[in-house]
Image (cartoon, helix red, strand yellow):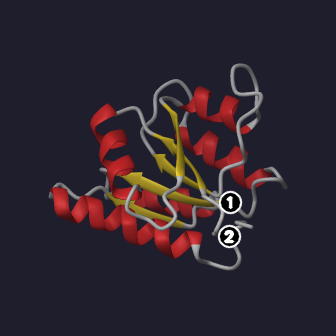
Amino acid sequence: MAARPEILIAEDNPADVRLIQEALCVLDPPPNTHIARDGEEAIRFLSRSEPFTTVPRPNLVFLDYHLPKTDPSGVLAFIKNDPEFRNVAVIVFTTSNMPELIHEAYVLGANCCLSKPSDLDDFLHTVQAAAQFWLNSPLFSGIA
């Protein structure tokens, strides 16, 4: 049996967190999901600071680009500038379609930028397709 992927969802909207988790639970194998509700918490999770000292390294990160407390670009820069996390795929998931935001995310190392669909079925499908693509990518899967 394949190892269960570890996915960090860095998202402050509880409804979006729940939808992302629901979308991911149909994957085979279903991933373990971890939640960071703001940018500071995401960095504490990734750096395994209190209270996250025993958490696993994520294989994939869904990053809302409008997180409170720490500029999400700082979270993305933290991930992509740390050798331990460079091969962790980061999906920037945002409600914005601003070209400058998308450009910034790619410059900082985002693997893809996706707009959050307003339609429920489209939202679920987008999350599932993105997760399946990046978790199965030989460069980013990191799954034993």
Name which residue lies at 41% across and 57% down.
24
Residue reaching furthest to the left: 119
Figure quadrant of the C terminus = bottom right
Local secondary structure at mark 2: loop
Report how far apart the C-alphas of labels 2 and 1 lie in the structure. 6 Å
Whether 16 is drawn above or below 49: the answer is below
**Quarter where residue 141 is shown:** bottom right
Give amino acid for label 2.
Phe
**Crowd class of label 1 (few under 14; some 14 to 19; many from 20; radius 10 Å):** many
**Pointers 2 and 1 in contact (C-beta within 8 Å):** yes
Q: Is residue 25 left or right of residue 34?
A: left
* Of the pair 27 and 115, the residue shown nearer to us: 27
Give percent across and percent down for residue 94.
37, 51
Give percent across and percent down for residue 35.
51, 36
Local secondary structure at mark 1: loop
- Return the residue at label 2: 140
Give amino acid for label 1.
Val
Q: Which mark is residue 143?
A: none
**Crowd class of label 2 (few under 14; some 14 to 19; many from 20; radius 10 Å):** some
* Of the pair 80 and 85, the residue shown nearer to us: 85
- Return the residue at label 1: 88
* Of the pair 8 and 117, the residue shown nearer to us: 8
